[in-house]
Image: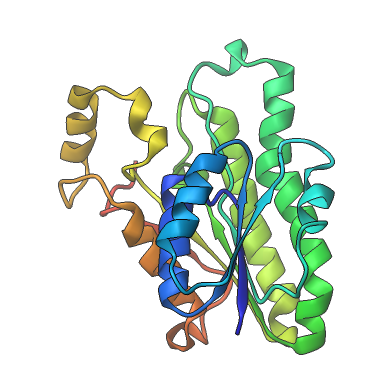
Amino acid sequence: MKYALITGASGGIGASIAQQLARDGYGLFLHYNKNKERIETLKTELVNVCVTAVQADLSEVDGVDSLLAQIDRPIDVLIHNCGNSYYGLITDMSDECVKRMVQLHVTSPVLLTKKLLPAMIRKKSGNIVVISSIWGLTGASCEVVYSMVKGGQNAFVKALAKELAPSGIRVNAVAPGAIRTEMLQLFSDEELQSIAQDIPLGRIGEPNEVAKTVSFLLSEAASYITGQIISVNGGWYC
């Protein structure tokens, strides 16, 4: 059996990825920070699946070591999904918030990848998928730091894919647009309707549409795909 580690598995997209990879036959390590109740519920939904919950705050400098201390076997698939956003002017954002955003979205994923890579390289096999964002490609006013760290993730994917290709390890990213998750809860129904009208497909995306894209990238059907940022956004390019 192959094992996948999904960071941020208690969120809408993370939980959907967990459900999809369970259907694909993976054993799962499901990371969370605070939402233990959601992870426990998710575990009950994943019947006949080897599931281990791991808790760590990846916005803290010791978060990666704390997470890795709970992993008891080599990881075949690493899904970097953990993240949060900050909506507001950059001048209103505290220095501490900036540091935590960079730690959560850039530093921790890089360090976690670095520490899990030796086992993948020895096997000459592995898959890494980063859940990025449309804002990492286009940038967004009032989400400047979020756009910056997501852009950093995209650059990480492109560079790492080149470095790891000779070792048989593929690295890709999925860049969702507007997806029906907790991140959209700060918008009113009217605002969401307006966003949907701007999207060529005319609707907000669903978490399972991101999860199915991840499943594809991990499959043999994507065996010649690496270093790519796959947009799942209904044609919405801002």
* Position above or below: 173 against 217: above
Q: Is residue 233 above or below residue 102?
A: below
Q: In the shown orientation, is residue 147 left or right of residue 108?
A: left
The residue closer to the viewer here, 56 or 42, is 42
Please tell me which residue lies in front, 42 or 205: 42
The percent coordinates of residue 182 (x first, y second) are 40, 35
- In the image, taking residue 199 as reference, residue 42 lies left or right, namely right
Image coordinates of residue 86 in percent, x first then y, are: 53, 26
Residue at horizontal 31 percent and vertical 43 percent from the top: 180
Q: Residue at x 75, y 62 (%)?
A: 113
Residue at image point 37% right, 41% down: 181
Residue 95 placement: quadrant: top right
Q: Is residue 231 visible?
A: yes
x%, y% of residue 198? 20, 39
The image quadrant that residue 100 belongs to is top right
State the quadrant of the C terminus: top left
Rendering colour mode: rainbow
Whether residue 90 is situated above or below residue 216 in the rendered picture:
above
As displayed, is residue 142 above or below residue 7?
above
Residue 146 is left or right of residue 68, and the answer is left
Task: Work out whether residue 230 can be spotted.
Answer: no
Residue furthest out toward the top: 92
